[in-house]
């Protein structure tokens, strides 16, 4: 209710399932005088007649009396004379409109990411490899198309949440607090200000029309997860248990809204728990605490858009065995941008980050970015330039062509891009302690790539195939050296190429989908023993299959499997982790119009596998979830 009280007079235009329809035209008697914004919201000007018409491509027109302030207009999908129903996937993000190789994950997938971990992205999104390990306070490593995890930018509503300290997200945020997630593969997306030279992930907050929803999940290993959402607000409380029995607690709070032409958001997280080391190391009693907040505000006035954001974080690590450690890392960040949304959209961005660490000492990172993007016919493209505080420029760009083929259900696309990634503070300055060491002589990375794909999308069937090629110079990789000390170094040349394929169909009661990725990422440093060898932790194959059907008594049965090929753990391909396949099952039933209960088992056959060297994957785990969703 707070949203409606504060918001300017207006109404929402949505699909039947409540997702917004941006760009819907508002008019009367054949004339149009406005359209909805990216959240499907139309703000009254005061000159509208009593009876309005709402028009959006793929939907039947709505005509009726002017809706009251804060109400919603639901549009019905339009079926043409051919009998084909055009499926419109609405999103408030920018990745889907910029990068063709983008997958949008909705409610069911977010629940899976929350209860089974980000590792469940394996086999669900082609080209993505996730490692999640380290106990109740896990490290989450997400690689795309053979790239390094720090080449994946992560954002909330377009605001980057990656840290200049290590290039990873700055907080342990629960995916359950969001409404959808865009996962895009390929560099130079032009929407983030991070290092998304391999791909980007954009988490989208709950819709302003989100009905009250609550869920609680209990796992057989002792973990308990609770999450609730209402309109633009969400909260999560979690008790997480590691594979060796360590326990941690975390909470996430998300609040978003708008007042007239001002949109705002707040995201905060706090977590504390024990960490687990690899099996081959001495037993440790390490404990980690982490707190992070991120705030953003955007003001729109005609074609001009001004945004500011800021954040603060703190991470503390304590350990007494097998050796003593007391590391504290603190960071502050601030950013401001101005955009002009004309025929060519131009955006400037200034970013400042201050880091204070007992390990790497005090550092600041300042950069300025200028981006320009435009769509013209079948082409869309963007160019960017980032300048560091020492005056070093880095250029990025992407051009994409996309076209529907001969009025069929096939769409073809092709893209070229070039992108960069600068070393993080940890890469450069991590002190030598006998185990790890930074490298102040690291050079910035440069990636250049291309992709081409074909999509088929009908009312019952979808398929997508994409081939890609990426050439990277000075790739930054952390690996142990000859003395066993972990340190980053530049791989002077590496190439990643592959094929991504996904397909599936859905009827009213049954659906089946599957993905498979074949990716070869090799070290191409000439005149070295490593030339032509696979880069560490890049499996050649990943795959996944998900099936769902509804049987008697309104029971929904689901089955899924994910698999991964052999992964080498060193540069010379002498040590590796074997391939594995994990199977899961679940059964759910809607108890009433608002409540659902589901039981399931992950890794049903208790397959033994390793996430990374020395860290075992999760064994057989049973789950029960209760969910309430209001009207």
Image (cartoon, rainbow, N blue to C red):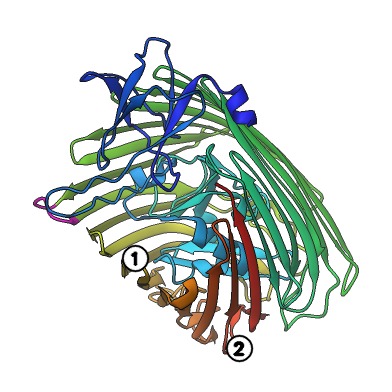
- Between 519 and 226, the one lying in front of the other is 226
Q: Is residue 67 above or below residue 60?
A: above
Horizontal arrangement in the rendering, residue 424 relative to residue 13 (left or right): right
Circle 2 residue: 606
Q: Is residue 409 magenta?
A: yes
Q: Position of residue 117 (x, y in %)?
A: 60, 66
Q: Residue at x 81, y 80 (%)?
A: 282
Residue extending furthest toward the left: 406
- The image quadrant where one finds the N terminus is top right
Q: Report the residue marked by disc 1.
A: 508
Tell me where residue 342 sits by quadrant: top left
For residue 200, above or below residue 119: above
Spot occupied by residue 631 in the image (x, y as percentages of width and height): 55, 46
Compared across the picture, whether 218 is left or right of 319 comes to left
Mark nearer the viewer, 2 or 1: 1
User: Where in the figure is residue 380, as x and y percent of width and height?
Assistant: 26, 39
Q: Is residue 626 left or right of residue 496?
A: right
Front residue of this view, candidates 51 and 1? 51
| Picture coordinates of residue 286, whole percent (x, y) | 83, 67
Q: From this viewpoint, is residue 440 visible?
A: no
Is residue 138 found inside the magenta-colored segment of the image? no
Residue visible at 55% across and 84% down? 577
**Secondary structure under badge 1?**
loop
Residue under the point 56% across and 23% down:
7
Say the numbered circle drawn on residue 365.
none
| Residues in magenta, as a range | 405-410
Query: What secondary structure predominates along the stretch shown in magenta?
Result: loop
* Tag 2 secondary structure: loop
């Amino acid at each position: 209710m707070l949203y409606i009280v504060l918001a300017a007079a207006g109404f929402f235009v949505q699909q039947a399932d409540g997702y917004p329809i941006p760009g819907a035209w508002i008019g009367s008697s054949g004339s149009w005088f406005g359209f909805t914004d990216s959240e499907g919201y139309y703000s009254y000007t005061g000159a509208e007649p009593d009876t309005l018409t709402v028009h959006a491509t793929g939907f039947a027109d709505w005509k009726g009396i002017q809706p009251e302030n804060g109400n919603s207009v639901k549009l019905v999908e339009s079926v043409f004379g051919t009998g084909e129903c055009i499926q419109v996937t609405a999103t408030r993000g920018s990745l889907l409109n910029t990068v063709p190789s983008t997958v949008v994950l909705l409610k069911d997938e977010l629940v899976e990411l929350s209860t089974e971990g980000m590792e469940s992205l394996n086999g669900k999104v082609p080209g993505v490899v996730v490692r999640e390990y380290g106990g109740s306070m896990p490290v989450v490593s997400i690689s795309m198309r053979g790239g390094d995890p720090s080449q994946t930018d992560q954002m909330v509503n377009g605001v980057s949440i990656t840290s200049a300290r290590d290039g990873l997200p700055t907080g342990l945020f629960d995916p359950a607090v969001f409404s959808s997630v865009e996962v895009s593969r390929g560099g130079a997306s032009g929407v983030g200000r991070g290092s998304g030279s391999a791909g980007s992930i954009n988490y989208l907050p709950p819709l302003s029309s989100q009905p009250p929803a609550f869920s609680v999940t209990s796992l057989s290993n002792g973990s308990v997860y609770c999450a609730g959402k209402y309109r633009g607000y969400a909260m999560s409380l979690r008790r997480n248990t590691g594979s060796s029995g360590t326990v941690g607690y975390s909470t996430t709070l998300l609040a978003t809204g708008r007042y007239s032409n001002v949109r705002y958001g707040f995201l905060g997280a706090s977590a504390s728990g024990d960490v687990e080391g690899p099996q081959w190391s001495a037993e440790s009693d390490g404990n980690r605490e982490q707190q992070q907040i991120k705030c953003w505000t955007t003001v729109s006035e005609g074609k001009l858009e001004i945004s500011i954001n800021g954040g603060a974080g703190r991470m503390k690590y304590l350990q007494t065995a097998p050796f003593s450690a007391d590391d504290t890392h603190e960071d502050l960040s601030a950013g401001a941008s101005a955009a002009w949304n004309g025929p060519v959209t131009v955006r400037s961005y200034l970013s400042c980050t201050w880091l204070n660490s007992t390990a790497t000492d005090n550092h600041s990172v300042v950069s300025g970015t200028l981006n320009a993007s435009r769509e013209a016919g079948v082409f869309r493209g963007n160019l960017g330039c980032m300048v560091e505080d020492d005056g070093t420029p880095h250029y990025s760009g992407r051009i994409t062509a996309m076209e529907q083929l001969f009025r069929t259900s096939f769409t073809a696309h092709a893209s070229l891009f070039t992108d960069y990634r600068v070393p993080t503070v940890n890469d450069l300055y991590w002190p030598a302690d006998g185990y790890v060491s930074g490298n102040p002589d690291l050079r910035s990375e440069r990636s250049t790539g291309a992709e081409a794909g074909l999509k088929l999308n009908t009312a019952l069937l979808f398929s997508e195939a994409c081939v890609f090629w990426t050439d990277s110079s000075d790739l930054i990789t952390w690996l142990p050296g000859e003395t066993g000390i972990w340190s980053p170094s530049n791989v002077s040349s590496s190439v990643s190429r592959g094929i991504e394929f996904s397909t599936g169909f859905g009827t009213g009661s049954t659906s089946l989908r599957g993905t498979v990725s074949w990716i070869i990422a090799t070290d191409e440093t000439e005149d070295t023993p490593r030339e032509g060898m696979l880069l560490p932790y890049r499996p050649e194959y990943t795959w996944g299959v998900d099936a769902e059907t509804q049987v008697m008594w309104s029971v929904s049965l689901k089955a899924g499997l994910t698999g991964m090929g052999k992964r080498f753990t060193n540069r010379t391909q002498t040590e590796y982790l074997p391939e594995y396949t994990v199977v899961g099952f679940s059964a759910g039933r809607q108890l009433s119009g608002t409540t659902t209960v589901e039981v399931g088992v992950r890794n049903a056959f208790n397959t033994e596998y390793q996430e990374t060297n020395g860290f075992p994957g999760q064994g057989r785990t049973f789950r029960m979830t209760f969910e309430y969703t209001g009207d």
